[in-house]
Image (cartoon, rainbow, N blue to C red):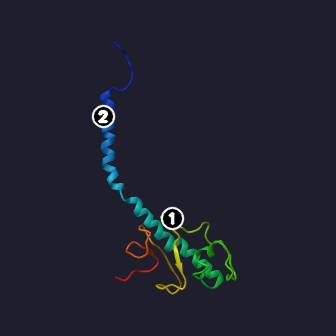
Amino acid sequence: MDNKKGFTLIELMLVVIIIGVLVSMVVPRLAGRSEEARIAAAKADINANISVALDLFELDNGKYPTTDEGLPALRAKPGSASNWKGPYLKKEPVDPWGKKYIYRSPGEHNPDYDLYSYGPDVKEGGSDDITNWEEKK
C-alpha cells in the first residue's frame, strides 16, 4: 500500500469550484466602485483639500489668487502676494482623471472663486461635472 501524501484531483477541483463561487459573489458588488471612488476623491479635493489651501492663502494675503495666477499660486509665490507663507499644497492639484482642476476668481457661481473638475467624461458641462457650487435644478 503506497502512503503518498498530496491532494487528489477531486480535492483540487473542489477548491477551485469554491473559489469560483466566492469570486462570482464578490465581483459584481465591486464593479463600478472605482469610478465612485474617483468622484469621491474629486469632491474631497474640491470641497476640502484645495479649498482649505485657498482659504489659507486668502488669510495670509487678504485675497484669493486671481484667475491668471490660478492654483499654481498655492505652490509658488505669485507676484501679487504680499504675505505668502506657502507652499499651501505639496503637489500640483490634478483631478482623478489626470486633468487640472479649473479655478476662476472671482467666480461666476460664488463670489470668491469657482473650483471644479469636468468629471468622468472630461468634457465641460453635463451632469457629471464636480463643482464647489450647488447646481440649480
When asked about the image quadrant of residue 92, the answer is bottom right
Disc 2 target residue? 14
* Residue 20 screen position, x and y as percent: 32, 42
* Label 1, label 2: how far apart the Cα atoms are: 44 Å
Instruction: Give the left or right position of residue 46, taking residue 31 as reference.
Output: right
Instruction: Give the left or right position of residue 96, taking residue 127 as reference.
Output: right
**Which is more foreground, mark 1 or mark 2?**
1
Image quarter (top left, top right, bottom left or bottom right) of the N terminus: top left
Tell me the SS state at disc 2.
helix
Q: Residue at x 55, y 73 (%)?
A: 50
Residue type (three-letter) at the residue carrying disc 2: Leu
Q: Which mark is residue 98?
A: 1
Q: Residue at x 32, y 30 (%)?
A: 11
When asked about the image quadrant of residue 125, the answer is bottom left
Tell me the SS state at disc 1.
loop
Q: Tag 2 or tag 1, which sits nearer the N-term?
A: 2
**How many marks overall?**
2
Residue most extreme to the top? 1
When asked about the image quadrant of residue 88, the answer is bottom right
Classify 40 as above or below 83: above
Nearer to the camera, 120 or 3: 120
Residue most extreme to the front? 123
Nearer to the camera, 127 or 122: 122
